[in-house]
Image: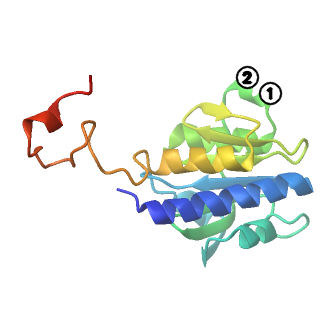
Amino acid sequence: PADSRAVDHVADEVARAAADLSADGHGALIVLERETGLEDAAESGVMIHGDISADLIRTIFAPRTALHDGALIIRGETILAAGALLPLSETSVHAERFGTRHRAALGIAEQTDAVVIVVSEENGQISLVERSRIVRNLNEAHLARSIRHLLDPNHGRRRGAFGWRPGREPTTPSAARAPR
């Protein structure tokens, strides 16, 4: 299970960076690793192994810098690599409707369980891609909430549906009954 404090930190820093980049009209492609390892993609870029921070993310995606065009790959609370190359989605519908960043986001999300955040350079729109779904027009708060949910579905709640912790039986019969 994910550490909810770490998930909060990642969600907050990534969402803040995306909102700032959007406001500045700068594009970004941020990949959050989940179960599927992203070593191959990471090794196509420059290995960073840096602590995650909104400021570092914004610096990496500053225009006309060496790494701003590729993807940023995050593992846990660490920026693993920047300037990484991702596979492009092959779907012709995507090729017509989306630019390269969005097609790369869809490509990695189709092949792995990664969560991908895209900031459009053209219109500043923030999108989140997971599997083959794309959610567009997110603000900072909504993006942070979505990242938290995708990285830690129980987000700090470690209790079962009826209020007891998994693996432990309720101590009183009334604890197992559904609310009326």
Taking the spot 52% from the left edge, 64% from the top edge, the residue there is 75
Residue 73 placement (x, y as % from top left)? 61, 61
Q: Nearer the viewer, residue 131 or 51?
A: 51
The amino acid pointed to by label 2 is: Val
In the picture, which quadrant includes the C terminus? top left
Q: How many numbered markers are drawn? A: 2
Residue 162 placement (x, y as % from top left)? 24, 36
Instruction: Tell me the tag on residue 51.
Output: none
Drawn side of residue 24 relative to residue 36, left or right = right
Q: Nearer the viewer, residue 94 or 53?
A: 53
Tell me: residue 38, above or below residue 137.
Answer: below
SS for tag 2? helix
Which residue is label 1 attached to? 97
Taking the spot 80% from the left edge, 71% from the top edge, the residue there is 59
Mark 1: few, some, or many residues within 10 Å (few <14, many ≥20)?
Answer: few
Image quadrant of residue 45?
bottom right
The amino acid pointed to by label 1 is: Arg
Which residue is label 2 attached to? 93
Q: CA distance from mark 1 to mark 2?
A: 6 Å
Can you see residue 72? no
| Mark 1–mark 2 CB contact (< 8 Å) | yes
Can you see residue 34? yes
In the picture, which quadrant includes the N terminus? bottom left
Taking the spot 46% from the left edge, 56% from the top edge, the residue there is 37
Taking the spot 73% from the left edge, 28% from the top edge, the residue there is 94
Residue 179 placement (x, y as % from top left)? 26, 27
